[in-house]
Image (cartoon, rainbow, N blue to C red):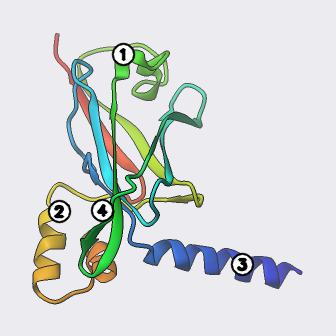
Amino acid sequence: MKKARIFSIVIAMVAAAFLPSCVYAPYDGQYVTSKSPIAFRGYAVDAEDEVSIWAYNQSTSTWDELATTTSSSTPTTIGGDTLYAWSYNLDLNTVPSWICYWSPTCTWPSEGVYTAQFRVEEASSYYLPSMEEDGVSCVIDELNNGTGWLAAGQECSSPNSPVINLKIAIIW
């Protein structure tokens, strides 16, 4: 029984690692501002698939679902794979207690750089790989060199994937 469960978990992890879905914006380590919405963008493997945006609440130590969106019904072919674009503009000012995602005390204690963690989940319950700043250009280079979409996505994903660390600077 235990071996079957472990095998199922390993299969799910391997499948998730090779699915062509991704988050290409924002990139891991990007600076954002509370004055402009954060533009989340990516691709899903299925048309009209639900995509959820989660953030780590530093005051409660939980991952909270902040928003959902749906992938397009119009296919896009990239590297021979059919994908469906999705996007969502997350306005921090509409998120209750949004500062708790940046500070465990839910306040700005002083000037400095604060980091929030986000991740994106597709309806099939796996977290989408995220990229670093040069991730999109890396994938394009890999595709131009004959690398397949799956291998390019693996090669170009962020080492923190699937977590996307966003930063905000406070200057008084």
Q: Secondary structure at mark 2?
A: helix
Residue at 39% in and 60% down = 161
Number of residues whose C-alpha sits closer than 10 Å to that of mark 1, classed few (under 14), some (14–19) or many (20 or more): few
In front here: 42 or 115?
42
Of callouts 1 and 3, the N-terminal one: 3
Q: Secondary structure at mark 4?
A: loop
In front here: 123 or 15?
123
Of callouts 4 and 1, the N-terminal one: 1
Residue at 44% in and 28% down = 101
The amino acid beneath tag 3 is Ser
* 160 up-or-down from 30: above or below: below
Rendered-image quadrant of the N terminus? bottom right
Tell me how far mark 4 sits from mark 1, CA to CA. 27 Å
The amino acid beneath tag 4 is Ser
Residue at 41% in and 17% down = 94
Choose top left, top right, bottom left or bottom right for residue 43.
Answer: bottom left
In the image: residue 25, left or right of residue 104:
left
**Numbered circle sitting on residue 8:** 3
Of callouts 2 and 3, the N-terminal one: 3
In the image: residue 8, left or right of residue 99:
right
Choose top left, top right, bottom left or bottom right for residue 125.
Answer: bottom right
Q: Provide the residue designation for mark 4.
A: 158
Tell me how far mark 4 sits from mark 3, CA to CA. 26 Å
Q: Secondary structure at mark 1?
A: helix
The amino acid beneath tag 1 is Asn
How many marks on residues? 4
Of callouts 4 and 3, the N-terminal one: 3
Q: Are marks 4 and 1 in contact (CB under 8 Å)?
A: no
Q: Provide the residue designation for mark 1.
A: 93
Rendered-image quadrant of the C terminus? top left
Residue 154 in sight here: no
The amino acid beneath tag 2 is Val
